[in-house]
Amino acid sequence: MPVEKQLSKLKDKAVSKLKPSVARKVELKQRIAKAAMEVFMEKGYEKTTMRQIATKAGILNGSLYNAFASKEDVFDYIISRVSATLMSMYRENTKEDDDFIHAAVMPVALEIFVTYRDPRMAELFHEAYSSWPIVHRMVDRQTDWYLSMSSNSNMRLPADLWRRLLLTSGAVGRLIDARHYSGTGDLREDISTYVFLVLTMLSIPTYGVRDLTDRIIGELESEAFSGPLEIDWDLPIQL
């Protein structure tokens, strides 16, 4: 049986084990998130209202607020599922990663990559990096990722890791903004810039930028990452 069908059956089985009330809430969250994503794409995050999201989803405001406390929660739900989808693709197509730096940079490298492959993602991440509350949550997850990766290596992380990742995220946001507004750019140059930023942020010599960039570009240009991103809404948050 193809892997895709096996995964689909496992997901269906997992959902079927949920209590009916929980399953309905999960389905409602996904329905709202999909509708919200369309509104965010059309109007932008700042100009979107919860009422517009409810209307698009075909539900009452009360039902929307029962599922999500705020617009920020809705948008973060979307971003977290996009990140989970990207990391699932990374894990499925990369052998066990014992290179801390490579593993550390891949989540954001994948974000940069999909902004080149899919205009929807360029718009989505442009909006995400333009919102302080959303950036805050993204950096929280990124910090957790770095800590989990370092636990399996001898890498010693700086005490102010969160702050350093926040500063790095500002630079990433500007790279994505440039891509979003111009529709042009150079993926290799952007990835190289990000790798350089991470090495500098961790006080690691930057002479390995070119080799790591070559490795990442080689992985991203493989068939596994071709085509537009299809968000897997059923995946748990992995970052």
Image: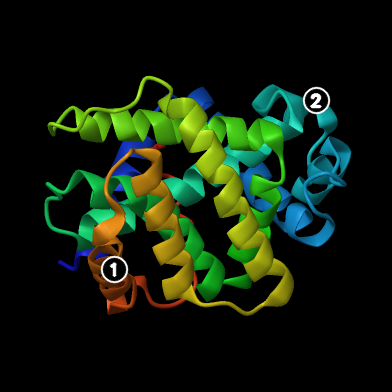
Residue nearer the viewer, 90 or 67: 90
Name the residue rendered at 47%, 27% in the picture: 162
Name the residue rendered at 34%, 25% in the picture: 158
Which residue carries the number 2 mark? Answer: 62
Residue 225 position within the rendered picture, expressed as x and y whole percent measured from the top left: 35, 71
Residue nearer the viewer, 237 or 165: 165
Mark drawn on residue 210: 1
Looking at the picture, does residue 152 appear above or below residue 37?
Answer: above
- Disc 1 residue crowd, few under 14, some 14–19, many 20+, Cα 10 Å: some
Left or right: residue 106 compared with residue 78: left
Q: Provide the secondary structure element on which disc 2 rests.
A: helix
Q: Provide the secondary structure element on which disc 1 rests.
A: helix
Q: CA distance from mark 2 to mark 1?
A: 52 Å
Name the residue rendered at 42%, 36% in the picture: 142
Q: Please identify the quadrant where the C terminus is shown.
A: top left
Q: Please identify the quadrant where the N terminus is shown.
A: bottom left
Residue 25 position within the rendered picture, expressed as x and y whole percent measured from the top left: 57, 30
Left or right: residue 223 compared with residue 185: left
Residue 233 position within the rendered picture, expressed as x and y whole percent measured from the top left: 48, 48
- Indicate the amino acid at tag 2: Gly
Residue 109 position within the rendered picture, expressed as x and y whole percent measured from the top left: 41, 58
Left or right: residue 69 compared with residue 52: left
Q: Are marks 2 and 1 in contact (CB under 8 Å)?
A: no
Quadrant hosting residue 43 = bottom right
- Indicate the amino acid at tag 1: Arg
**Colour theme:** rainbow
Q: From this viewpoint, is residue 30 visible?
A: no
